[in-house]
Amino acid sequence: MASNNDMSRRVVRQSKFRHVFGLPMKNDQCYDDIRVSRVTWDSSFCAVNPKFVAIIIEASGGGAFLVLPLHKTGRIDKSYPTVCGHTGPVLDIDWCPHNDHVIASGSEDCTVMVWQIPENGLVTSMSEPVVVLEGHSKRVGIITWHPTARNVLLSAGCDNQIIIWNVGTGEAMINLDDMHPDVIYNVTWNRDGSLICSACKDKGIRVIDPRKETVIAEKEKAHEGARPMRAIFLSDGNVLTTGFSRMSERQLTLWNINNMDEPMTVTELDTSNGVLMPFYDPDTSVVYLCGKGDSSIRYFEITHEAPYVHFLNTFGSKESQRGMGYMPKRGLDVNKCEIARFYKLHERKCEPIVMTVPRKSDLFQDDLYPDTSGPNPALEAEEWFDGKNGDPILISLKNGYVQSKNRDFKVVKKNILDGKNTENSSPANKSASPTPSIKSEAKLEEILKEVKSLKDLVSSQEKRIIKLEEQMSKIAI
């Protein structure tokens, strides 16, 4: 017979994340007076990185999102510049993991746009993207960058197709258009970006090798309920899904992609009807569930032994969330034992919520911060499309993450007549390539003219002041 000691040990599972607690930031640390988008689409409406927070907002006559430097807290002026090049509402945004100044957006106008944000944020509204990616025939609701290859971007639209782009050349390289018979709810990459996983309105989840254009694992009715599902990869290759049971109970389910007949485990949560958005931290194996319209964040630890999914705690607040941004690990404050930070969208504001593990020591906590994905890509786009894989390049957070200088993002349009004798190519083709530089030269000239006229103005005002001072001194005498 088991001793009492054994029993208690079995009941209370040891975990360093058992006492994680969430703390909302004070009012002056929030971003206030923001008209958060009202479109009925289940994306998170918010994307953050160590430099900026981006929020999709209501915009008349098109689609727009705000990009705010993290320190720009407080009330945001109505006239604050926006990114506003789309002609329809923006549905999803995602920061490039390898360049903190590059963000992609997908919109109801069927396009994907990639933007380069200036070093200190926007000074004027931006309507000219670096590149426009056209290939979808219906609205584009899902955007996600490749985790380890530079300039590889995935988009999924309501035309039920997934396109994978080489953003560096502006080309659609892979088109998966016959795998999903209905609307795609979400798509995520695995840890090294060799596979993708999708959840679809037909209640199926599919694990796809995008370069071979084959489905390698599939579960037809992952969740019986009719409401939207989500599927994400865990770092060990298993898939975690959130969805609804036939009785409209929300579920969290774990699948082994080598055997999709039965789930590894199913956790029933509650009967609320908000779609659960999972945010996963591969370093700590903690998954956070944020329901759209909920006022809480639940978090679970995933382990390798049954029952695999262990409930840790719930962060509750009064107001419901319209969307949620999730900070990459390198943007956290390691000195405060911060293991996650969320950016919760209310109707009119964005409120950071910090998840902390209580520790007495001020020293760096190695066990909380194993080396994490850094900003350097493991591969170039061409290498990945040629079949190469690369694990994320890890960095230590021991002395905090230090920003490195970002390379400017450039798009190199391939000459259509590549490989032929370009000497004889038509002049139209030749002039097509350098247009961006002509544009920027004209802009530079314009700026230089403006600077010169300002200088002239300053010197003429200086002369006027000297004259006036002389007159004043005469009067004083």
Image (spheres, rainbow, N blue to C red):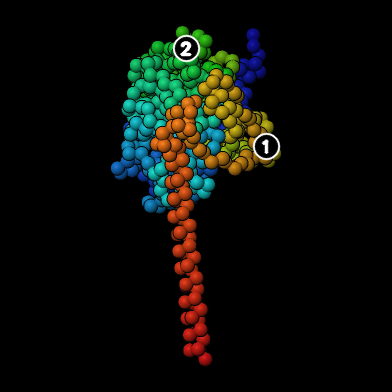
**Crowd tier of the residue under label 2, counting other residues whose Cα lies within 10 Å: few below 14, some 14–19, many 20 or above:** some
Please report the residue visible at 44 percent of the width from the left and 36 percent of the height from the top.
Answer: 430
- Say what amino acid the circle numbered 1 marks: Lys
**Front disc: 1 or 2:** 2
Relative image position of residue 101 (x, y in whole percent): 51, 41
Residue 103 vertical placement versus 156 (above, below)? below
Pointer 2: what residue?
A: 217
Q: Is mark 1 on a helix, strand or loop?
A: loop
Pointer 1: what residue?
A: 398
In three-dimensional space, the C-alpha distance between marks 1 and 2, rounded to whole angstroms, equals 39 Å
Relative image position of residue 398 (x, y in whole percent): 67, 37
Q: Which residue lies furthest to the front in this view?
A: 424
- Taking the image as drawn, is residue 70 in sight? yes
Relative image position of residue 150 (x, y in whole percent): 54, 30
Relative image position of residue 42 (x, y in whole percent): 38, 30
For the residue pair 416 and 471, the one nearer the viewer reads as 416
**Picture quarter containing residue 21?**
top right
- Say what amino acid the circle numbered 2 marks: Ala
Please report the residue visible at 45 percent of the width from the left and 45 percent of the height from the top.
Answer: 438
